[in-house]
Image (spheres, helix red, strand yellow):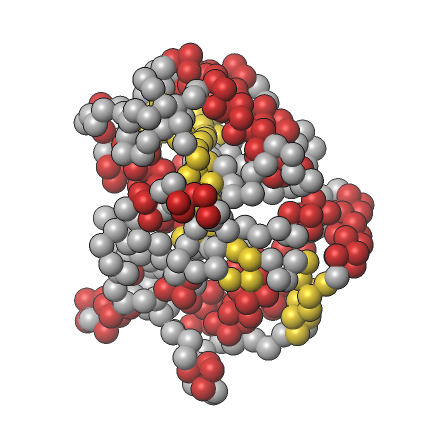
Amino acid sequence: MSSTDTLPLTRPQSQLVTVFGGSGFLGRHVVRALARRGYRIRVAVRRPDLALFLQPLGKVGQIIAVQANLRFPESIRRAVEGADIVVNLVGILQQTGGQSFSRIQTEGAGEIARAAAAVGAHLVHVSAIGADPVSASLYARSKGLGEAAVLEARPEAVILRPSLVFGPGDSFLNRFASLARMLPVLPLAGAKSRFQPVFVGDVAEAVALAVEGRVTGGRVYELGGPEVSTLERLVRYMLEVTMRRRLVLDLPLPVARIQARVLEIVDMLTLGLLPDTLKLTRDQVTLLQHDNVVSEEAKAEGRTIEALGIVPTTVEAVAPGYLWPYRKAGQFAQGRGTEEQAMIPDSLAPVPMGQGSQHRPYQASGPALGADAARGDQKGSRWGKRT
């Protein structure tokens, strides 16, 4: 199969997809998207007992969790045995114990690619915008080296690089919203750095399209949302939605590095018990000094989310539906005090954003279900429905 070939379209029910990291934030959305299409899914995770919540997303026996650890190649080979397609979603934001960037995001990615090649399985690899083998950031460098290892073992693999991923359960808007409940000041490292937030459902749809063989292999796709925003602007938007007033500080780089070092020491002294919301590493500070947006080259070459036929979802269409618990009065805070607050929606955007949009208000969580919230048969149905 050449690097420009795509998979032949076959019946999903006859194909087995192994998803590494399927129980994570992005993974659960990918598993759901694949289950809806009818694929048989093998979720490869370190703790299968913690992935059982995925089984109701499909039919009986459609989703099975198995044990696999990227530090042990034999477990990887067992997980991909008999698979037609392999999806790698594994990634870490900071190093802990044996979970280092190089082991997980470079060596682990290479092992998965070699295992997929050994059984003749198609490979979809999720990396990140900013991946660069020569980056000063250990995270970005390991991602770039991981991509190189994947393409060396499986040249026709599809590589997807999302920007900052948001959605219910994310570690970005939820993290800053948690900090805003605890702290009177929100210090930001890299406040002026630009991001292109992309909805988790859109990224999952891109993965599903690649699994279906509708995405050309041997290429790197950059996935970004419809808007480019600075870190400071995104944090201020979160404060508007949660109706909290906090001082937002743009930390100079030397101060940010000192803050990160202090938090690293505190985390070490507490044996890793420092809450994730408070953790910050010097490598993350380095990473935040660079923009995280879709490149002009990707746009010109048609390697974007729009080129895949997906209409990207805005932050404003989804975020209010899962940030409401951070308001002082939760769902009962209606935001009628000021003109600015009155402009913040109290529920999700009531309708999808157009053909190809993955924003489905009737399936999302939040204090209301958009226009359906007023219907008699929807009253009291806060969490949406699964189809």
On the picture, is 362 further left or further right than 290?
left
Residue 56 or residue 68, whichever sits in front: 68
Please state the horizontal and vertical placement of residue 380, each as a whole percent of the image.
29, 67
Q: Residue furthest top?
A: 118
Q: Position of residue 74 (x, y in %)?
A: 52, 14
The one of 273 and 154 positioned closer to us in this rendering: 154
Q: Is residue 60 visible?
A: no
Question: Is any part of residue 210 visible from this angle?
Answer: yes
Q: Position of residue 97 (x, y in %)?
A: 70, 33
Q: Quadrant of the N terminus?
A: top left
Name the side, left or right, on which 321 lies relative to 90.
Answer: left
Asked if 25 appears above or below 156 in the picture, the reply is below
Nearest the viewer among 295 and 375 is 295
Which residue appears at 41% of the width and 32% of the height?
A: 219
Residue 160: quadrant of the picture:
top left
Q: Residue visible at 69% across and 51% down? A: 285
Q: Quadrant of residue 297?
A: top left
x 48%, y 72%: residue: 241
Q: How many marks?
A: 0
Residue positioned 40% across, 27% down in the render: 218
Q: Percent x, y for residue 61?
A: 28, 29
Q: Is residue 95 above or below residue 273?
A: above
Q: Is residue 126 above or below residue 267?
A: above
